[in-house]
Image (cartoon, coloured by chain):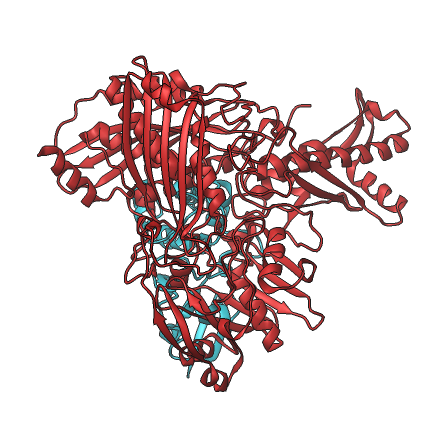
Chain colours: A cyan, B red
Amino acid sequence: MRNIQITVNGTGYSLLVNEKRSLADFLRKDLNLIGTKIACNSGHCGSCNVLVDGKLVKACILPAVKADGKKVLTIEGLATPDGLHPIQQAFIEAGAVQCGYCTPGMILTAKALLDRNPDPTEEEIKQAISGNLCRCTGYVKIVEAVLLAAKLLRTAERSGQ
Amino acid sequence: MAKKYVGQGIPMLNAVEKVTGTMCFGADFTLPGVLYGKILRSPISHGRIVKIDTSEARRLPGVAAVIAGPELDLPLFTARGQRIDDDRVMVKDKVHYVGDEIAAVAAVDEETALEAIKLIKVEYSELPALFSPEEAMQPGAPKIHDHLPSNVADHIEYQIGDVEKAFAESDIIVEDEFYTGMVHQAYLEPQSVVAQWECTGKVIIWAPVQVPQSLRYSYARALGIKPEQIRIIQCNVGGGFGAKQECKIHPIAALLSKYSGQPVKIVNTREEEFMATFPRMPMRIHMKIGATKDGTLLAKESRFIGDNGAYTNYGIGIMVSAITRHDNLYRIKNIKTTSDLVYTNKPATNAFRGFGNPQSHFAFESLLDILANKLNMDPAELRLKNATQTGDVTPYGWKIGSCGLSECIEKATAKADWQRKRQEKKAGEVVRGIGLACCLHVSGNRTFLPFFDGAAAFLRIDEEGQVTIQVGEPDIGQGSKTVLAQMAADELGITPDQITVINVDTSSSPHGLGTFGDRVTTLAGNAVKDAAVKAREVIIKYAAEKLNVPKEELEIEDGLIKVRGKSDLRVAFKDISQIASYDRGGGTIQVTGTFVPQDVAVVDPQTKHGNVSCAYPFVAQVAEVEVNKTTGEVKVIYLSAAHDLGKVINPLLAEGQIQGAVAQGIGFALFEDLKLENGSTESNFRKYRIAKATDMPKIDTIFVETDDPNGPYGAKGLAEPALTPIAPAIANAIYNAVGIRLKELPMTPEKVLAALKAENN
């Protein structure tokens, strides 16, 4: 067991963690943040993707102790009391959500992409989400959602929000 | 009345929960005091258990219960309504495949449960294992189930018309053999459960499932208790595709709870999913078709062998669907079929989107392409010439109330630029080709469930005018809650967001058969519509009293009840809801809607005759591929999918169903393959590849609305047939590109290269 200091969605935690515990299990079991999904637990599907210091990581294969001292953003940290994040809004409007199990990981993957590339092409989006498996949608509307989100974010930026 | 919401592509009503991560799926659900269960699975394919010792596991600190099949006297059972009792919640004395449940542990955490599992000692006496049905059918083959007469679970043989005569009259006969492999539903949310066995003898099971009401009956028999002792509470489902029906982790969790006195949670690992859940039934299909020179189909003879795996589940129903359904796609009158469903020492197969249909259509639609080629005829023309039409009664007695097959073929080919692309010059290393395939399906299916058909809905309007609907058909991620709310909104004259369709709880929901067989939109939809019409009558009655006008003069629009033609006489839906509630001592408006399709019959066991569904959807799809002759790789670059779904209730969600089916169809066609390694199908998402974003082609979806007389607003099923034609369309496109005929799925680069090599020799 090791003590870690970690900030998750803006809240600071100081907790004893088993060295073997993955970040995904830590979020789900120790912090009760069930929005981070586990589908393969081997780093092959992207359902557990979260941002650690702004970088996309697969939380199921990253030991929680490696996130010591870092800032983690999970799906629960994206919306504000004022409303949904534009990426979330875009996923709803574009019909990019079916069962919803891959959705949190997919949205955070989209965020990582749009943070570094605010105006991606369709091909760049497909490449960026190619590590995220979805069994329901066939990805078409997810790609459309990310394009729409990029547009919404650019508009928001121009209007100085 | 004009429809305001039916036909609109409104986003899923519960999407906010999904994009914010607040939706609690089965795998997320838990209870205070929960223990974690793990299962000891057989490491061998076939053998007797000589000895089992659980004592060390029981002594491990933190272990609350250890149960073992050989130590419990668990009854034989099978899925509800099915014929062969060949399964037990945990094995008694013999294991039948790698993954078979032997024992289970409940402990304070998963780590302790896993450690305890490793402490259980089992001694086996191995038996020869059978991995192919052909081998298992041989006389003298070792028997997989001691108490059954042979390894053939079911044999079917029937003839319609005079096949011998029709073949004799045929100008051209084509014949070939096809094989479809073992593929997995691979939903992202693993199978999961929390169960609590109360001291009163009642058991509550929380699980993400498609058929909650039926599970009570299956598990009552599996556990040797009464159905009324079991309550199933459906959790949100993270994808099902047919797989989330009976699953032994549910009754195992119940037993662990019984022996530990605490609630128990089990979540499958992805490796367990591939090893011990319910892949699509592999089939070997030999088929022969006879036709006249002008392309009129005269005769068809088929032989199917289905690889059942270790247990039957819904296997007989899958086989009957596979062997009969495609015969109703074209006007063909002379049909002879035999089939064998055969046990092997592999995972028990079960339902997967299409229910046997993708297997048979791969063979049938490939063979029709071969026939068209022999006739030197456009494959689209051959299909159009023979296509089933509205009003047909097929040789199986199917009454085709609406059929847009011809229109689907015409529109899908036109959109894909079929004529030009088909005749393009095929040269170079990377060659393009185009292929067509069709299919039909059902909207609810009476092939394999004898009890009843139809659906029911409970609809309640509270004193604030908010509507709650219960059906027996869970939303498994496809968005049926939204579609049903759209229908009710139009009938009640309110907005869909005032309507909540809630998950199934067997203690309060209607006794619905569940979500499968493309039955939800059509059957549950009709029931919801009926309920909404009845509730509207109650609202109108109170409004007529309030406004003091005859009820015939009233209409509801945008939440207002108005006197037709008089804009000043109106009252809010919400206010009437309150008046109605207060008038009934707080009792809200509650109605039951029902739909029992007329003229639908259970299939005759001998002849397979019977109108199995009230509405039949039809599909035509055209795939365009690029075949790399050096690497053998096939890439699907375009797909046009024309669907006769009767009526589109929600085009946004309907497109999503088709696009998702394309992804699954491409996987089925080109790379998904649950391979056996040392008898085991254990795998993960690295080895078992499903389609990624980069595998997807451009897709054009085309809706053909034929307005079925039995569907709500004319709507028929959609999700399952969307997958069925993809594999044969791709196979036919490969033939068009490079002249090779691939007859085994998946069509991997190795198989493409081998066929190209054979073609050149």
Above or below, B739 against A69 in this view is: above
The quadrant in which residue B234 appears is bottom right
Q: Residue lying at the far left in this picture: please name it.
A: B761
Q: In the image, residue B566 lies at what x, y percent?
A: 81, 22
Q: Quadrant of the N terminus of chain A?
A: bottom left
Residue B653: percent from the left, percent from the top?
51, 38
Name the side, left or right, on which B244 lies relative to B473. left
**Viewer-proximal residue among B308 and B140:** B140
Residue in view at x 24 percent, y 17 percent: B376
Residue B644 lies, with reference to residue B339, above or below; the image says above
Query: Can residue B474 be spotted in the picture?
Result: yes
Q: Report the front residue among B606 and A74.
A: B606
Q: Nearer the viewer, residue B77 or B461?
A: B77
Percent of width and height locating residue B406: 43, 19
- Tell me which residue sits at (42%, 64%) in the image: B100
Report whether B401 appears left or right of B577.
Answer: left
In which quarter of the view is residue A61 placed?
bottom left
Foreground: B451 or B389?
B451
Give above or below for B35 relative to B697: below
In the rendered image, the residue lying farthest to the front is B140
